[in-house]
Amino acid sequence: MAQASLSLLILLIAFTGFHRQLQVLSSEYDFSYMKSVYNATYLPPEEEYDYIVIGGGTAGCPLAATLSEEYSVLVLERGNAPKAHPSVLHASGSLANLMREEEEDVDDGDTPAQRFTSEDGVANVRGRVLGGSSMINAGFFSRADNEFFSKSGVEWDLDEVEKAYEWVEESIVSRPDLSAWQSVVKEALLEAGVGPDNGVNLKHELGTKVSGSTFDEMGRRHGAVELLNKGDLKNLRVAIHATVERIIFSTKTANPSAIGVIYTDSKGESHKASIRQNGEIILSAGAVGSPQLLLLSGIGPHSYLSSLNIPIVHSQPNVGKFMADNPRNNINLVIPFPYIPSTARVVGITNDYFIESASINLPFSPTSLPFGFLPTPSSPLELSLAVIAEKIVGPLSRGSLRLASKTDVKATPHVQFNYFTDPTDLSRCVSGMRKLGELLKTKSMDRFKYRDFNGARDFMFLGPTLPTNQSDDSSMEAFCQSSVTTIWHYHGGCLVGKVVDGDFKVIGTNSLRVVDGSTFTISPGTNPQATLMMIGRYVGLKILRERRELNYNGNSLSAIPQGQNYLGSHIKATCGQETVLSSCVCNGQ
Ligand SMILES: Cc1cc2nc3c(=O)[nH]c(=O)nc-3n(C[C@H](O)[C@H](O)[C@H](O)COP(=O)(O)OP(=O)(O)OC[C@H]3O[C@@H](n4cnc5c(N)ncnc54)[C@H](O)[C@@H]3O)c2cc1C
Ligand SMILES: *[C@@H]1O[C@H](CO)[C@@H](O)[C@H](O)[C@H]1NC(C)=O
Ligand SMILES: *[C@@H]1O[C@H](CO)[C@@H](O)[C@H](O)[C@H]1NC(C)=O
């Protein structure tokens, strides 16, 4: 243990040269956004907004907040508010979220982590709560690699990218508090050759680094939902328990134009929300939800939609295609002494794979342990476990998504990811697993071994163990295949360049964009949430700029509708600007 405290001391010293962007953030939750949150049952059957954001998730929240700075915005989120599910508000609840899902056989329609199993047979989850999957994830916050920006098919303005990341980071990202276990992981990664030591850094660089977290030092989660607070709450209406069924289009224009959405509330009542002229609908329902909604709305492969008798609005062969999920393979070590649970704060970055680890306490049940070891559980009821996980870069393997129901949006689509069908993915996993093997051989890890009855010292694993002959490709490949699971970074279905253009606009339609993980060809950086939040902000600002240009060019100013608007302040926000250009009369002002 002396060794452990020494390494902690060294890390503390290292912290004095802390990265500028990371602040000690130990703030209380900011629930200001609740002023804008409404139960969908209380919303009128029909109304109008400038922008409608479908899905109040990781990308949807920063996007909606940004648009609300100048326009009226409606966010439609199928889940409840985080307050209704206290487990999403704290690191200690993350595991409970996932376990709760595992314990229950049937989906009650309300858990914040909605379970689904891909056609590959791998159990998975997706967020169903305001704030989206950022409210059920592991909190690890790390920016995208440069390759993502050069290859994503988007002409990024990198200064704007930087500002958008900072906009997110100043509010919800904390300086990581390295627990004993995370310090060990860092030490072991460096010892196993995953260098250099990049200290504390949000950037994606080869080597080992400590990154940011959306959990503060008290373990409180500050997810994407808190970014709503940065908008103009008077212009923002967030409907919860609002499940969007489909997008409606006008076909009067050459290309179909999105004009509104149909959503249902928790009583099953149907509502219609429409957009005003020059407004837009932005789909941010995630990699499963967004392709699903496009298909249900008649945008998808012609023959597929016809086979389901879904009226075709726009034939688009690539909707629901190119679905991908980075396989996760991990080993779990039973730790011989009590350890405080920790979420991942350290990552080892190579060109082929990334390694992260979390320590957790599990309810202790002696019967679940392999015979021959004498564990000393951290308490009579709990067992300390370290999960060391590897995620491959990419991936290159691709799958697809099919509807499970052509009428019921609540039926999670069938998704197939085809893990490791591309040989590069498999060889990346093999390299990653070999590195895990090297990690276990480091001096830093030695003290986690147990002594068995014969006096031999070895690790105690819970779950899969690495093959003994790690130079043998075929046994390593077999290990990758048989122990594959998900790191929940699934993406695709509405790819940039295939379904949306470089401005995230759905190709062949008007007034419709997709802004979320469904647009990614590859998963950005080690972990995607930072980039998803950044993109929400980035695209929001881009839309505001485009709209300003449109207004100043004098287009359709005379046609700005002045209809019913009970978001009183919106009138001020938009008309205040517009009166300069046209003498609009706003609700009698
Ligand atoms: C368990 C877990 C751990 C993870 N750990 C990390 C991590 O540590 N670091 C990291 O960077 N990433 C992590 N991720 C991945 C990351 O959280 C996701 O990639 C990201 O949150 C996805 O963002 P999104 O905006 O694409 O979708 P989401 O955030 O999932 O948002 C989609 C939203 O749309 C809503 N929606 C869907 N359909 C409808 C509909 N029909 N009507 C109304 N609303 C709808 C959903 O309820 C949801 O709120 C993790 C994910 C999970 C699940
Ligand atoms: C919304 O209102 C309905 C009807 O009053 C109620 O049954 C439901 O529980 C409410 N939902 C939330 C999220 O508060
Ligand atoms: C391990 O596998 C390699 C490659 O298949 C083989 O050459 C070697 O003999 C094996 N070693 C042992 C100890 O089995």
Image (cartoon, rainbow, N blue to C red):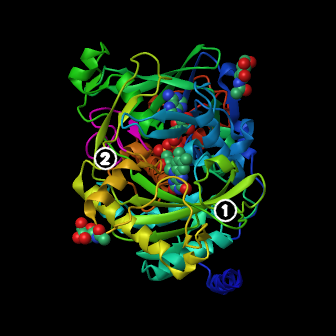
Label 2: element kind:
loop
Q: Quadrant of the N terminus?
A: bottom right
Q: Is residue 566 left or right of residue 272?
A: right
Rate crowding at label 2 as few (under 14), some (14 to 19) or many (20 or more) other CA atoms within 10 Å.
many
**Res 121 → quadrant:** top left
Does the magenta stretch mainly form a helix, a strand or a loop? loop
Q: Nearer the viewer, mark 2 or mark 1?
A: 1
- Name the residue that disc number 2 marks: 496
Query: What percent of the width, then of the height, locates residue 460?
Result: 57, 62
**Earlier sequence position, callout 2 versus callout 1:** 1
Q: Which residues are magenta?
A: 492-515
Q: Is mark 1 within 8 Å of ligand 3?
A: no
Instruction: Looking at the picture, tell me which residue is in the foreground, 42 or 218.
Output: 218
Query: What percent of the width, then of the height, locates residue 150?
Result: 30, 63
The answer, for residue 498, to whether it is visible in the render is yes
Instruction: Looking at the picture, tell me which residue is in the foreground, 123 or 216.
Output: 123
Three-letter amino acid code of the residue under disc 2 = Val
- Name the residue that disc number 1 marks: 374
